[in-house]
Amino acid sequence: MSETLTVPERGALAAAHRTGRGTAGREGVPVLGLWRPAPGVVVALARVEEVLASPPELARLRPREHRSAAAMASWRGREHLAGRALLRLLLALERGEAEARLPVVPEPAGRPWLPGRPGTGVSVSHSGAYTLAAVADGLDVGVDVQVPRPPSPGMLRRCCPPPTAARLAALSALAPDRAASAFARVWAVQEACVKARGTGLSGAPWRVPADPDTMTGTWRAVRWLRLPWPVRACASAGAGAGAAAEGVGDAAAGAGDAAEGAGDAAEGAVGPAEPAALACAFGPPVRDAGAGAGADDLTGADARTGADARTGADARTDADARTGADARTDADARTADRPPAAACRRAAP
């Protein structure tokens, strides 16, 4: 398998990427970045608000998805709808409108799949202002986006090997923003891997080995890659959705690949901060036969294995057990992402 992070794009998605046009030549596809981390795997990044402002994307949503979102906290419902709409946009571009309107059902651990297309892997994540979605041919896939938030000492100890935890703890005292960005890169990889396997938190994402400056690796039968942040998305922050990112580089040239301050052990632990960490993982299909009987929604998040769906004490550190994101005020939730640390500390809603 190629070590490059992208391969040449083909068909409708390639045209949408180059021109900002979607199905039937429509302008204004709300995509910030597109990646093909492996043959048959495509990943898209968008801003939640830009997806929700695109009527053609919302038109693909099924009534049950709207009903599910209406039963959630408003901020969470918006994330849910945006993630589903972005997934369906990818399906439309890659497979056509008919496939984009199929039911999406959850497996017991929350992983989404298309019951009419068992050979197609799908995944969705959202964090803060962003949502990330993936479609894969003949592979299981998991994606995760994490807006950086400061990690607690307990999270560093649980999710990082001792040398990395020590470096990030030291960096937290010197440059907390960079430490938060580094930990977000670790947690995004860990989440993407367990989502690709469909295990949820029972897969113990904190046991997935990941370093904040490593761009690619393997875990069990899964290959994972960190996706470099699309440069044009940084330059166009707050601008219209038509500025789709182009040509993300290969693994060696990806954003965040080079560590700064090589002479300082703490500073050398991580590269420059990005608005959010992005990761994708994929591997041979492992399908749960009991998935989604009669269901047509993911009850709130395709990224249930991520920072917004938690299973209890086994997912908490002793030092970091406290009320999670669902207990925040609406004002907090509108402006802050559920921190990666929440995945190891909060009970399910």
Image (cartoon, grey):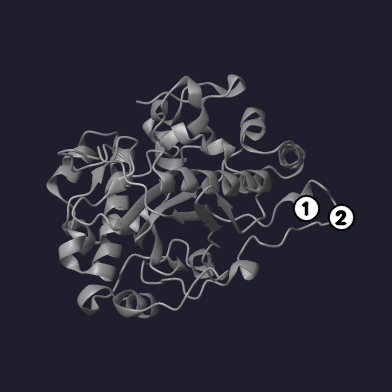
Label 1: element kind: helix
Q: Earlier in the sequence, mark 2 or mark 1?
A: 2
Q: Which mark is residue 263?
A: 2
Give, as a three-letter code, the residue at label 1: Gly
Q: Residue at x 72, y 45 (%)?
A: 175
Q: Residue at x 44, y 61 (%)?
A: 238
**Around disc 1, counting alpha carbons within 10 Å, would you say few (fewer than 14), some (14 to 19), or many (20 or more)?**
some
Q: Position of residue 317 (x, y in %)?
A: 57, 24
Give, as a three-letter code, the residue at label 2: Gly
Q: On the image, numbered disc 1 is attached to which residue?
A: 268
Of 70 and 294, the residue lying toward us: 294
Label 2 with label 1: CB-CB less than 8 Å: yes
Q: Is residue 157 above or below residue 17?
A: above
Q: Position of residue 229 (x, y in %)?
A: 54, 62
Q: Position of residue 77 (x, y in %)?
A: 28, 41
Of 174 and 36, the residue lying toward us: 36
Q: Residue at x 63, y 54 (%)?
A: 273
Q: Is residue 160 above or below residue 275?
A: above
In the displayed image of the protein, which residue is found farthest to the right?
A: 263
Q: How many marks?
A: 2
Is residue 205 toward the left or the right of residue 29 in the image? Answer: right
